[in-house]
Amino acid sequence: MSNISKSIALVGRPNVGKSRLFNRLIGRRVSIVHDKPGVTRDIVVEKLSDSLILMDTGGMGATPDMTEKVIADATNEQANFAITTADTIVFVVDLQAGLTGLDMEIASLLRSSGKDVIVAINKVDAPQHSQLASDFYSLGFKNTVEVSAEHGNGVDSLVSMLEAKYGAFDTEAKNDGEDRIKICVAGRPNVGKSSILNRLLGEKRLIVSDVAGTTRDSVKCDIDVPVKDGDTMKFRMYDTAGLRVKRKTNTSLDYLSSLRTHKVITACDVVFLVIDAMEGVSELDKRLAGEIAEAGASIIVVVNKWDYAVEMFSRSTLGNYKNIQEFGKDFETAVRHELPLIGDSRIYFVSAKNDTGIDKLPEAAMRIYKKMNSAVSTGKLNTVIQKLLEQNPPRYISGKRFKVYYSVKVSSRPYTVRMYCNSTLSLSHMYRRYLTNGIRDALNLGGVAINLELVGKVSQTIQERLSSKK
């Protein structure tokens, strides 16, 4: 998996400020911070150095009145997992709320774990607040520090304690991953995104439940996959919150989750667009595919819950299909019709529940990544574009017909084709789509986002005038 050897976990009851402290320690906003208890559900992980990670966990003791019972149980399970695996535990408590019975239960659990524990008394936002902290010192832990995650007070003292154990935090290491293919698992709520990523990871890291919207945050994981020649495929994978239609994004938390998902998609090279086998392609799936392409990422369509389709066929409830392969072929045709962007790119039918088909996804990501970065000779590219123009000449717009003099590929993410043309104003949206799809088909770039960058004579003339005035 990686060369990480030590880990620190932030634990505590819900809404004591763990995520805000996590963001302070790593120096940027990663975990979603919200006043609603139970926002952090999965373990969020970031590097503090090449050999040290920091884990943000869901609130321990989460109850069904905060969120659905199945999620509350899974959140508690994840926090216990972090305690078991961590070398040092930062036990975060809330000064303003005072010492609670749940704090004392967690303290007892931590003492019995035998782990190294630092108590971080949070929300000491003013000097006079410090006199309220005596109850927390009575918990009996050797190391206690007063902090304000919101204002930064005392955080340096906590950092000093941790650095005394593990060495200085490496700010450069926190932004690593440039050598990894970045993959995002995206889709509507409850299509099985976390289950797929859990299978890829080979461990139960992410909360999985039948409740829609379980994943609030975007969770990052690195995986290394060995290949036949002894080499290794390196990936950085992100699980994301399920995207909802806008009219259902009706809380600030939904909005933050959606914003984080869009940000992750923009940062990734490849997106596994997960579709529910029993529901097919929805309007939201189509909108999301367009958004992925606009962000410049490549798409691999993953049809999850295929085990249900097989089960239905065995019960003869899939109509007049002769076999499941025939149904799959018809299903694939329908998906390609609804998502023309994927072109000839293979569609993967998987079952996260039964762990079938998942092992093929890393290699699929590697293949489409290579497509994105593949070179194309300018001669071949110009031949393809001229043929498209001849087969379906563009219409006259404002007395001009669009012409392309010369084209060249200039970048890979997105796959950008720069066209030197007579005017950037005479190309309609529909014709741009025709050229994009034509280039994709001709160069076997199914699933790859293609951007057309137009450079026209008008733009060149303006540039020359501006240059002459300098």
Image (cartoon, helix red, strand yellow):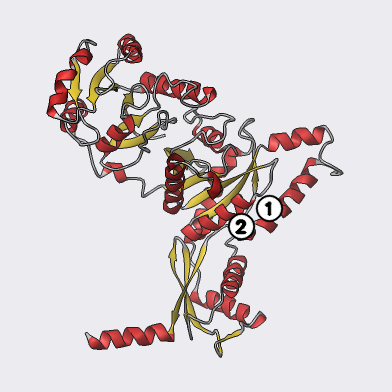
Q: Nearer the viewer, residue 220 or 148?
A: 148
Asked whether, in this view, residue 113 is left or right of residue 469, the answer is: right
Residue 403 appears in view: yes
Compare marks 1 and 2 and give the one earlier in the sequence.
1
The tally of labels here is 2
Residue 253 in picture, x, y percent from top left: 43, 39
Q: Nearer the viewer, residue 429 or 62?
A: 62
Asked whether, in this view, residue 372 is left or right of residue 49, the answer is: right
Indicate the quadrant containing the C terminus: top left, top right, bottom left or bottom right: bottom left
The residue wearing badge 2 is: 342
Q: Nearer the viewer, residue 296 or 291?
A: 291
Mark 1, residues whose alpha carbon is within 10 Å: few (<14), some, or many (≥20)?
many
The residue wearing badge 1 is: 335
Mark 2, residues whose alpha carbon is within 10 Å: few (<14), some, or many (≥20)?
many
Residue 81 in picture, x, y percent from top left: 42, 21
Q: Secondary structure at mark 2?
A: helix
Residue 381 in picture, x, y percent from top left: 53, 74
Asked whether, in this view, residue 461 is left or right of residue 168, the answer is: right
What type is the residue that disc 1 sits on?
Val
Residue 21 sits in which quadrant? top left
What type is the residue that disc 2 sits on?
Ile
Q: Residue at the location (49% across, 35% down)? A: 215
Q: Secondary structure at mark 1?
A: helix
Evaluate if marks 1 and 2 touch, with contact meaning CB atoms under 8 Å apart. Answer: yes
Residue 234 sits in which quadrant? top left
